[in-house]
Image: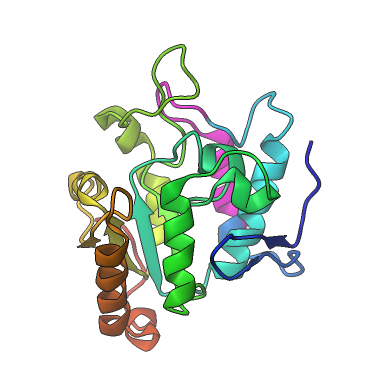
Amino acid sequence: MTPMSSQLALPGAATLELPPVTAPIPAVEELLAALTAGGAGATCNFYAGADPDAGERRERLRRYLTAHWAAPVVLVGEAPGYRGARRSGIPFTSEHQVLGHGMREATATIVHQVLAELSAGAQVLLWNAVPYHPHRRGAPQSNRPPNAAEIAACRELLAAVIAGRAVVAAGRTAASTLHELGVAAAAVRHPSHGGKAAFAAGLAAVLAAEPAATVAARRPGGLP
């Protein structure tokens, strides 16, 4: 098992502070309990089970969510990849960004770079519509799109995260997934495959249009 750190070292970006949780947030604790106990079809719940690193992934996510729960905007991806949250436990964050070694993920690197460039790390919470890892049968180090049943199984988890926040979909696939769930979301270009500049511009525009006071004043609630 790997030692916990109070920071994530993010190459090319500011360090993501993960202070110890001194005042637990009930909503976060409830979310983590549901996330750990839940599942979605043939996806991998990497926060539970016999995996010796599952507990560390849960604690990293707990610290991340607690530190960012007041964020007025949530950036939602489709699902974790095997190079990213599947190993780190934190959406849009790679193992290398957590431990300083191990797998890197281009999307994770770009997302954190852009958040640092926009000075928006505290304004944006990172999440996935399906927070478990969908992979091909017998190939855990692979990715596949989640199916409709898996997306539906994670509906309540998503609702708990997006309630009261402006929702931004990272890419067309995530936007389509959110649309299937009836979630109104702004869509920005996915940051991978040369999309960094467009992703940064789109996210900057959303942040400019969604000041914290406006989002905080919205009626609490998530999915219809």
In the rendered view, tell whether residue 193 sits above or below residue 69. above
Give residue 24's position: percent from left, percent from top. Answer: 69, 64
Give residue 55's position: percent from left, percent from top. Answer: 71, 39
Left/right placement of residue 159 relative to residue 205 reads: right
Q: As rendered, which of 109 and 56 lies closer to the eye? A: 109
Is any part of residue 21 visible from this angle? yes
Indicate the quadrant containing the N terminus: top left, top right, bottom left or bottom right.
Answer: top right
Give residue 75's position: percent from left, percent from top. Answer: 37, 61
Left/right placement of residue 197 relative to residue 34 reads: left
Instruction: State yes or no: residue 30 in magenta.
Output: yes
Is any part of residue 71 visible from this angle? no
Q: As rendered, which of 200 and 19 lies closer to the eye? A: 200
Q: Residue 53 is drawn in which quadrant?
A: top right
Left/right placement of residue 189 relative to residue 93 reads: left
Residue at the image point whose x is 33% and y is 44% from the top: 78
Give, as a single range, the part of the protein colored magenta: 29-44
Q: How many marks?
A: 0
Residue reaching furthest top? 138
Q: As rendered, which of 197 and 93 lies closer to the eye? A: 197
Residue at the image point whose x is 60% and y is 44% from the top: 95
Q: Residue 224 is drawn in which quadrant?
A: bottom left
Q: How is the image coloured?
A: rainbow
Give residue 212's position: percent from left, percent from top. Answer: 39, 84
Residue at the image point whose x is 24% and y is 62% from the top: 188
Q: Residue 204 is drawn in which quadrant?
A: bottom left
Residue reaching furthest bottom? 213
Instruction: State yes or no: residue 24 in magenta.
Output: no
Q: As rendered, which of 202 and 90 lies closer to the eye? A: 202
